[in-house]
Amino acid sequence: MTAQQIIKRLSISLCLTCISTGIFASPAKLSTVKELMQVSQIEYLLRQSLIELGPYYDKQAEQIILNTTGSQQLNAKEQQAATQLSQLLKDSSTQIISNPKTQQVIEDIYLKTYTEEELQASIKFLKTPEGQSITRKNAKMMGELSTYMMRLGQEMFNDDKTRENFQEKMMAIIAPLLIEKQKNKAAD
């Protein structure tokens, strides 16, 4: 058998494997997605993540007030405003995850990403004690990871050199747009 014949047979085998894999993998069903979302406690995970992000929202609100007022430290009124702003941020995030559109988007992502068989396997696992334990721990882990990432981002942005570098790069992107807009206004 020549190398060309071997390559031809391998190509045919590969094509048949791809076709048969596609035939046996069925598209995800909405009912299965909904069951997985219930078993995986996706709504709980999102709400728990918001709770874990509470300290981040507090810091973010304080930073906004400091930047807005130019103060170095919050006085009592500014602290009260920061508390209210933090609550506003939390409430806005809660509205986003409670929005039926958010649920629809999550469902759509599951439908596009997974096959029916993958969803069934996930459900089967998540119904075990180990799966349930992992689900509960994932909420805490994701909250801690989000808090860390946001804190790190805030620390980086609070660093004068990093902030200046970011602002320079941002202006390099935005400046041509502003110049073009001014030219268009002048031409009108």
Image (spheres, helix red, strand yellow):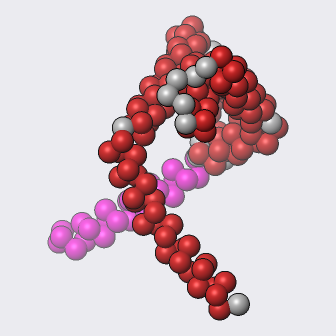
Relative depth, front residue between 5 and 174? 174
**Which secondary structure dominates the residues rendered in magenta?**
helix
Foreground of the two, 133 or 4: 133
Residue lying furthest left in this view? 2
- Quadrant position of the N terminus in the picture: bottom left
Does residue 125 appear in this view?
Answer: no
16 in magenta:
yes
Left or right of 72? Residue 50 is: right
Farthest-out residue, top: 129
Residue furthest right in the image: 100
- Position above or below: 39 against 89: above
Compared with 41, 180 (above or below) is: below
Residue 27 visible, this orientation: yes
> Residue drawn 45% across and 59% down?
170
- Percent x, y of residue 34: 75, 31
The residue depicted at 49 percent of the width and 28 percent of the height is: 72
Q: Magenta segment, which residues?
A: 1-24
Q: Position of residue 178 (x, y in %)?
A: 56, 73
Which quarter of the figure has residue 128? top right
Residue closest to the eye, 110 or 117: 110
